[in-house]
């Protein structure tokens, strides 16, 4: 109402008919859009309610407390056949997180390595990285996943003929077996020493920066810090071994009868999913990294070298901070893609959130609308969280213009 | 050191000096090897590692895929005595006769063999029309566009589904590479206008339109495609008035189109944002209204800028069609996977997936090269240098 008092509006109104007024036309257009959209949504919801009532299944979330009654192959929290659907759902969410986080870490490492290799002056290395990128970026992720799961991991030897690395790591058709660390008495002391070392190194860095700002003298933070972080736990390790005996034992997987006992087992489904997702996404991350590094103009390197900075400092203080600014925003969307693509777990039978909840629970309870709403909210919430975090990080490293 | 009177000032002044080629360490293959592969100890190490890797990976693959592979059916199968199976293939080589035996199904799904010419005709017409649009030298662009976007869809629908004199083929029988192409083409053709509308809505100054567009775009982009397909598959039938049914393929097409449109909308928005204010002001000062301004001035420029990114999105959408298997449609990947589960063909998983990967790779790599070449061609002055 306030803008009716705007100067000049009345003059315009006298000059043109009201239906030619841009403001009024906008209002009418919006009213019509809103009417259509709200009408359509109400129509759809009305149909949904009528359909569901006709089938005798009114909208309700009470099924979440029912007993699920089906097993899931892997879970971070203990679940059994008597667990409620809510608990099964949480187990699925955690499985999604496990696959997502593992793939994000692996894809970032592989992606950065390939991206740097792509820029290598070595012709062969650069071409190999280029071939990696072009091959894995242009084959659908699902084809790659199926290849790794049905093609490779299903065809590895059986338990008796497992692929064996140093009698500690085994790969066979049942999964990927790793030794399990077993902390003994006094292991807490080593963890404590590590924590003290890290905090000490951080304090040392702060102190040395202040001193450098005040006096200009440099202190070898990197070496002393590393000595703290590595040395303290090693000392603690030695001390604990002398007092209590070995602080950490390993439980190795051992073939007993038809199967391996002990150790940590990664399901072949999880292994295939993480390998496939990381290799696929790493190709995209490599391109982002290459673009980011190339975006830093060569003049920056030359200027840094002209100032007398060493090569390693040039990289650490001049090139990487500027490249990160270009790299981080697209990297965020790749992380979101990993998360969204982890739903392809459905195809290889890894019990992620979609496979467990949107697949099995939906089939068993027939509560389409309720299940789909929760699924959407879950992914929207995670997408939003990652975006917010990466925006915060991006702001943190963004160019501060003075 | 040197007597300056003897130093030649140039080749002209000293004709008796014969021309010598530059030292071998500066030009030629040796120099190339030196600068590119062995410039430092570290570089030499990398080269050795790379060569070792290639020697480890490439010969076994070539042996598997070509030398040890089985390319032809054995005598008895050619004579028609029995059908082929995995046992006809060498144990350590690729079994390409599996692909040959099943190629009809891989391309057309369960489409009746006698009617497959209809599918072929549709794709020949489509590719002819698309090529006519993409290759700049071919004239009649407007007539071509009319054919491609109005006549061809109706014609294709009739040819594929049948009726009116042709045998009816239910969409449940569609499958294989044909289904992949149909989903990709229909999804993209419908998603493009929807995406442009959403992008315009997102840039709109009308708060309601803006808000609705943002909500739809961000919602769809925030959730995985599989959940959108699930939603389309199980919820669309519920949303329709009681008593109506909806074809499963159509449900998937709706979900796929909305999903692709949201991504295209963001690409087009990028193009719209790159258009300077002056263009809007110029159009407004000519007295153009909103729609004429968009149609005649803004969109032609914005779309032109965003064509490479649109092609990339289309490429992604093409790869995403593999996910329709989640609701039980037999697209190219799914039908190959099903084929290698056949009792006669146990152990052909890798062969099938490598074949699939090769076909997808050719399509996607071709599209991405096309997008790069377009980017180079269109990069003519919008960028500040």
Image (cartoon, coloured by chain):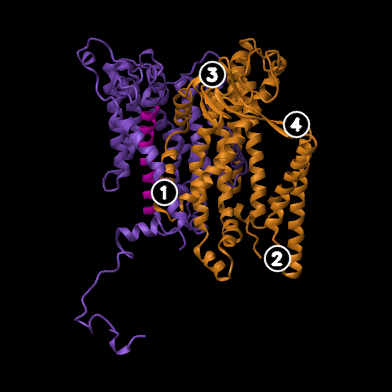
Chain colours: A orange, B purple
Q: In this view, does A353 lie to the left or right of A132?
A: right
- Region of the chain picked out in magenta, as a range: B353-376
Q: Nearer the viewer, mark 4 or mark 2?
A: 4
Please state which of the two labelled residues, at mark 1 or mark 3, is closer to the viewer: 1
Give the distance between the C-alpha atoms of the residues marked 1 and 3, in whole angstroms. 61 Å
Say which quadrant the C terminus of chain A sits in.
Answer: bottom right
Q: Residue furthest bottom?
A: B5
Q: State which tag comes first along the sequence, 1 or 3.
A: 1
Judged by its main secondary structure, the magenta piece is: helix
Count neighbours of disc 1 (C-alpha within 10 A) and say few if under 14, some if 14 to 19, many if 20 or more.
Answer: some
- Please name the residue that numbered disc 1 is placed on: B48
Residues tagged by mark 4 and mark 2 found on one chain of the structure: yes
Depth check, front residue: A40 or B288: A40
Q: Is residue A240 left or right of residue A382?
A: right
Let me know if marks 4 and 1 both belong to one chain. Answer: no
Magenta stretch holds residue A177: no
Q: Which chain carries label 4?
A: A
* Callout 1 secondary element: helix
Q: Pointer 2 indicates a residue of which chain?
A: A
Task: Respond whether the residues carrying marks 1 and 3 are from the same subunit.
Answer: yes
Q: Distance between the residues labelled 2 and 3?
A: 70 Å
Q: Are marks 1 and 3 in contact (CB under 8 Å)?
A: no
Alpha-carbon distance for marks 4 and 1? 44 Å
Q: Is residue B34 above or below residue B294?
A: below
Q: Name the residue under label 3.
A: B237
Which callout, 4 or 2, points at the residue further toward the start of the chain? 4
The spot of residue A273 in percent (x, y) is 53, 30
Q: Examine the rendering and report whether any part of residue A350 can be seen.
A: yes
Residue extending farthest right: A243
């Amino acid at each position: 109402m306030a803008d009716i008092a705007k100067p000049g509006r009345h003059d315009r109104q006298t000059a043109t008919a009201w239906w030619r007024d841009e403001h009024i036309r906008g209002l009418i257009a919006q009213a019509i859009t809103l009417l259509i959209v709200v009408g359509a949504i109400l129509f759809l919801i009305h149909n949904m309610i009528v359909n569901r009532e006709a089938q005798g299944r009114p909208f309700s979330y009470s099924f979440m407390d029912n007993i699920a009654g089906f097993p899931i192959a892997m879970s971070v929290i203990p679940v059994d056949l008597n667990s409620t659907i809510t608990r099964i759902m949480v187990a699925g969410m955690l499985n999604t997180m496990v696959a997502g986080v593992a793939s994000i870490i692996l894809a970032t490492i592989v992606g950065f390595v390939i991206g740097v290799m792509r820029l290598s002056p070595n012709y062969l290395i650069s071409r190999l990285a280029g071939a990696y990128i072009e091959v894995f970026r242009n084959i659908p992720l699902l084809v790659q996943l199926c290849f790794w799961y049905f093609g490779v991991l299903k065809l590895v030897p059986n338990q008796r003929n497992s692929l064996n690395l140093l009698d500690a790591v085994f790969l066979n058709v049942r999964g990927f077996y790793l030794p399990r660390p077993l902390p003994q008495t006094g292991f807490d002391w080593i963890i404590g020493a590590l924590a003290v070392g890290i905090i000490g190194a951080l304090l040392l860095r702060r102190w040395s920066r202040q001193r450098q700002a005040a006096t200009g003298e440099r202190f070898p933070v990197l070496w002393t810090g590393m000595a703290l972080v590595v040395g303290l736990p090693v000392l603690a390790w030695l001390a604990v071994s002398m007092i209590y005996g070995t602080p950490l034992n390993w439980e190795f997987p051992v073939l007993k009868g038809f199967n391996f006992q002990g150790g940590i087992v990664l399901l072949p489904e999880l292994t295939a999913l993480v390998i496939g997702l990381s290799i696929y996404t790493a190709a995209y991350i490599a391109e982002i990294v290459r673009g980011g590094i190339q975006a830093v103009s060569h003049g920056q390197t030359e200027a840094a070298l002209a100032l007398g900075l060493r090569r390693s400092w040039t990289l650490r203080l001049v090139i990487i901070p500027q490249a990160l600014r270009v790299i981080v925003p697209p990297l965020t969307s790749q992380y979101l893609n990993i998360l969204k693509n982890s739903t392809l777990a459905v195809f290889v039978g890894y019990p992620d959130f979609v496979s467990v909840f949107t697949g099995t629970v939906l089939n068993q309870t027939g509560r389409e609308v309720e299940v789909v709403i929760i699924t959407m909210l879950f992914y929207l919430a995670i997408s939003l969280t990652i975006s917010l975090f990466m925006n915060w990080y991006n702001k943190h490293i963004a160019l501060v213009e003075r | 050191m040197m007597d300056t009177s003897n130093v030649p000032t140039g080749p002209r002044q000293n004709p008796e000096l014969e021309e010598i080629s530059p030292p071998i360490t500066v030009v030629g293959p040796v120099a190339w090897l030196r600068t590119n592969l062995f410039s430092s100890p570290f570089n030499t190490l990398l080269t050795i590692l790379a060569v070792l890797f290639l020697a480890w990976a490439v010969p076994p693959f070539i042996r598997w895929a070509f030398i040890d592979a089985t390319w032809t059916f054995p005598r008895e199968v050619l004579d028609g005595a029995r059908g082929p199976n995995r046992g006809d293939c060498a144990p350590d080589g690729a079994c390409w006769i599996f692909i040959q035996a099943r190629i009809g199904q891989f391309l057309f799904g369960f489409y009746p063999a006698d009617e497959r010419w209809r599918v072929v005709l549709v794709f020949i017409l489509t590719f002819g029309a698309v090529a006519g649009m993409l290759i700049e030298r071919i004239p009649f662009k407007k007539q071509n566009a009319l054919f491609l976007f109005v006549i061809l869809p109706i014609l294709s629908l009739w040819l594929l589904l049948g009726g009116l004199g042709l045998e009816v083929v239910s969409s449940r029988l569609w499958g294989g590479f044909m289904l992949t192409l149909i989903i990709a083409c229909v999804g993209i053709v419908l998603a493009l206008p929807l995406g442009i509308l959403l992008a315009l809505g997102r840039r709109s100054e009308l708060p309601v339109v803006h808000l609705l567009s943002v909500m739809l775009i961000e919602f769809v982009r925030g959730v995985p495609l599989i959940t959108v397909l699930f939603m389309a598959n199980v919820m669309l039938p519920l949303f329709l008035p009681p008593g109506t049914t909806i074809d499963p393929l159509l449900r998937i097409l709706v979900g796929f189109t909305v999903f692709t449109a949201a991504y295209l909308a963001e690409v087009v928005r990028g193009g719209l944002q790159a258009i300077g204010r002056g263009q809007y002001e110029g159009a407004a000062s000519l007295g153009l209204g909103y729609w004429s301004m968009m149609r005649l001035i803004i969109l032609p420029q914005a779309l032109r800028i965003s064509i490479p990114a649109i092609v990339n999105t289309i490429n992604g959408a093409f790869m995403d069609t593999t996910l329709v298997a989640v609701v039980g449609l037999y697209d190219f990947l799914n039908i190959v996977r099903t084929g290698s589960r056949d009792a006669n063909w146990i152990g052909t998983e890798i062969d099938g997936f490598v074949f699939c990967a090769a076909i997808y790779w050719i399509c996607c790599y071709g599209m991405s090269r096309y997008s790069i070449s377009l980017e180079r061609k269109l990069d003519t002055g919008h960028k500040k240098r």
